Amino acid sequence: MSHSSTLEALAAAGIPAPVKPLLTVEGLTRVYGKRIGCADVSFELWPGEVLAIVGESGSGKTTLLNCISSRLTPTCGTVHYRMRDGAISEIYKMTEAERRHLMRTDWGFVHQNPIDGLRMTVSAGANVGERLMAVGNRHYGNIRGAAIEWLARVEIDEDRVDDQPRTFSGGMRQRLQIARNLVTEPRLVFMDEPTGGLDVSVQARLLDLLRGLVSDLGLAVVVVTHDLAVARLLSDRMIVMKEGRVIEAGLTDRVLDDPRAPYTQLLVSSILQV
Amino acid sequence: MNAPDTQTQNLASYNFAYLDEQTKRMIRRAILKGIAIPGYQVPFASREMPMPYGWGTGGVQVTAAIIGRDDVLKVIDQGADDTTNAVSIRAFFAKTAGVATTTSTPDASIIQTRHRIPETPLHAGQVLVYQVPIPEPLRFLEPRETETRKMHALEEYGLMHVKLYEDIARNGRIATTYAYPVKVEGRYVMDPSPTPKFDNPKMHQSEALQLFGAGREKRIYAIPPHTDVVSLDFEDHPFEIQHFDQPCALCGGEQVYLDEVVLDDHGGRMFVCSDTHHCESRRADGHRGALLGDEPGQDKEAMA
């Protein structure tokens, strides 16, 4: 049986064809002078998979995230991304125009502090519509319709569409930021402590919402968090970092229930029990 | 070429048209580059001028760099030839370059303008020099110069539409009435200086060369003749210019840009042409508006 007929047989049986990784990170290193931001990090991210990067503050989580998402040029190492047409591109070999286009269409980035990811002086509707306008949408009615639809999906009332995000609460701002990123239906979203700074009930609702969106849209997510509970709720796999290096990686349940590295054991045992 | 002559001898310490020849060459190079890349903001080494920033230092430097002895200069300020700024700049070049000045739009070879384009269509061979306060159309949306330059380089102009979106969301229509952003020759988004959007269509496929000088911001840009200049808009909210309910109160002109003039403190007001030359030449042709008084001489004849 040839390879292609095997694939057809799989498709006929309703089994999805084997996919290639969406994102491949190899030997990614970033140094700040003599200090290490992150060193020799490699992993693969598959379509629809949620990967959590955990570790204490200063462990290089955010440096790693910024290096993967092309916001910070790594010292060495490569990041390959599978584009929508199936071609594999190396992020740092693209032209800047291509990279920026990718960042506002196929990728999303959710900042810890919504002020960094939103335009605080334009309305919620324009915040959500900005990416649509950036890719050439020139019909006001359609843009506004899409904005209202996305606000509804992140549980923001339609009548807030013309309000500026500075009149929003912290949780609403974070939900607005998520809507703004998802409006172009990206395949990959980076999140830096998406629930940081929110109180627990708001955190729980946001996590619920994120879980729903991730499974509905089949998003692949790289989420940086120091909160192991967030990692357990959201992620399929996780990476534990310490002093810029990956010290443990595996399925989230495995890492959290059966931590192997002594540091991970310490991290897991440090969770406050209520 | 520019040896001192009798008219400028009493200003022997000044070169022709105030600026030294090296500076003029530098500005001309910037102008040529601007013409070669329509709508692109060319940085230039703006000089101190004997007037404060905001009074047209950029426009004056551009005019000084292109003016020759045979040129006829017209200067307008909000369409008027007789306001302080216009009179001073006209006098400045009459003194430092000894050139002829005029208030007539068709007779001028160089027209320096602050915030209007004359109503009389410009013809080939004329140069319109704009005084520009803030050349960067993206400035109020993105304060970082490094970022706005990158946005121009990569043609990332989505943000400009965010501003127009906000206008419609707040006011139900595009409420920007001046400094309305345009796209030049399908490439660069440009600020047409704070001219009313009424004048935007006049920039499109103009016969005349249009030069823009921003002195404080040190930028020159240009629109060569016969260049496409398209005002940005949405498909369902197309660009439109201002419309006035009444004709000019002095000359009865329609389809022109009008200024509101308050007459008294009881709410009395009149609307008159902002372009004084246009208004005067229409009156000379016998057009009369509703509030135009009679000439003193005619009054006497009527009484007699």
Image (cartoon, grey):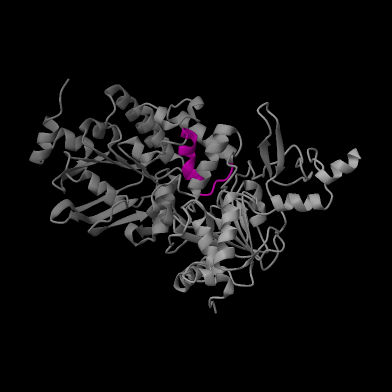
Left or right of B277 on screen, residue B53: left
Residue furthest out toward the right: B304
Q: Quadrant of the N terminus of chain A?
A: bottom left
Q: Main secondary structure of the magenta part?
A: helix
User: Position of B226 compared to B281: left or right?
Assistant: left
Q: Is residue B213 visible?
A: no
Q: Nearer the viewer, residue A208 or B203?
A: B203
Height in image: B51 above or below B5? Answer: above
Residue B240's x, y, as percent?
66, 44
Query: Which segment is the magenta one?
Result: A123-139
Q: Which quadrant holds residue B97? A: bottom right
Residue closer to the observer: A272 or B277: B277
Q: Is residue A2 above or below residue A219?
A: below
| B20 with respect to A80 (left or right) | right
Q: Can I make out residue B115 in this image?
A: yes
Considering depth in this image, is A206 or B118 the residue closer to the camera?
B118
The quadrant of the rendering that contains the C terminus of chain A is: top left
Q: Residue furthest top?
A: A274
Q: Is residue A126 magenta?
A: yes
Kindly give the residue lying farthest to the left in the view shown.
A262
Instruction: Tell me: A70 left or right of B99.
Output: left
Where is B280 relative to B299, above or below? Answer: below
Residue located at (29% from left, 32% from top): A195
Where does the image place residue A87, in percent across and percent down from the top left? 40, 58
